[in-house]
Amino acid sequence: MTVDPMFGLELESRVRARPDTIFAFFTDPTLYRRWQGDDAELDPRPGGLYRVHMPGRAVVEGVYLVVEPPRRIVFTWGWVGNAGVPPGSTTVEVTFTPDGEETIVRLAHRGLPTQSSRDEHAAGWRHYLGRVVIAASGGDPGQDPSDDGPDADRSDIAEVLP
């Protein structure tokens, strides 16, 4: 069986915040922990470490490839100890486009090895984009219990790619 290494997803959401505000939620470890992960080690510069300890889950690890404040971030992504999606094996790109008083956040995750891993990551990213929208808008997304993460209703997050 041949695995297509090009499975990817693209999601889009609006945030009631300026691009520099939402950008910080992807680069500042303290702000990052408000919406994703129990702990985050972030060194937002090309070649810098990207590591997030997920609640009740494994550790995600990669490196920043592109950091263009406040427009764009690209980093590698993978799960420590997971042979299917190991650290650095996939790429996440997040863009921040101003639109009046809001920002359009578009997240593309590329290189997932299977349709199943694509679907799992799409559910997770929908959940976490919903949380960052709340946090960056000045709200409190609350605690993120691992057992209801990806199952939360995030119908306001648009999936751009099939």
Image (spheres, rainbow, N blue to C red):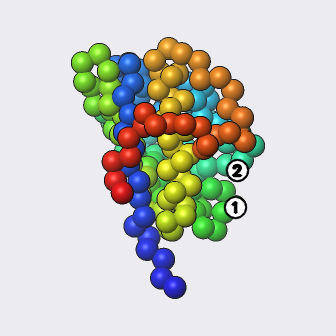
Q: Residue at x 58, y 29 (%)?
A: 35
Q: Specify the quadrant of the image occupied by residue 86.
A: bottom right
Instruction: Residue under label 1, please give it.
Output: 81
Confirm whether residue 47 shows in the render: no
* Residue drawn at the location 59% of the way across and 18% of the way down: 140
Could you tell me which residue is drawn at 47 percent across and 26 percent down?
133
Q: Quadrant of residue 120?
A: bottom right
User: Which amino acid lies under the numbered mark 1 shown in the image of this protein?
Assistant: Gly
The answer to whether residue 81 shows anywhere in this view is yes
Residue 29 against residue 92 in the figure, above or below: above
Looking at the rendered image, the quarter that the C terminus falls into is: bottom left
Structural crowding at the residue carrying mark 1, measured as other residues with C-alpha within 10 Å and reported as few (<14), some (14–19) or many (≥20): few
Residue at the limit of the structure toward the bottom, as seen here? 1
Q: In the image, is 119 to the left or to the right of 99?
A: right
Q: CA distance from mark 2 to mark 1?
A: 8 Å
Contact? badges 2 and 1 (CB < 8 Å): yes
Give the residue number, with chain letter if any, for mark 2. 58
**Position of residue 101 measured from the top left corner of the image (x, y, whole percent):** 29, 16
Residue 78 at x, y percent in the picture = 57, 56
Q: Residue furthest left?
A: 100
Q: Relative to residue 99, is residue 59 depicted above or below?
A: below
The answer to whether 19 appears left or right of 36 in the picture is left
Q: Earlier in the sequence, mark 2 or mark 1?
A: 2
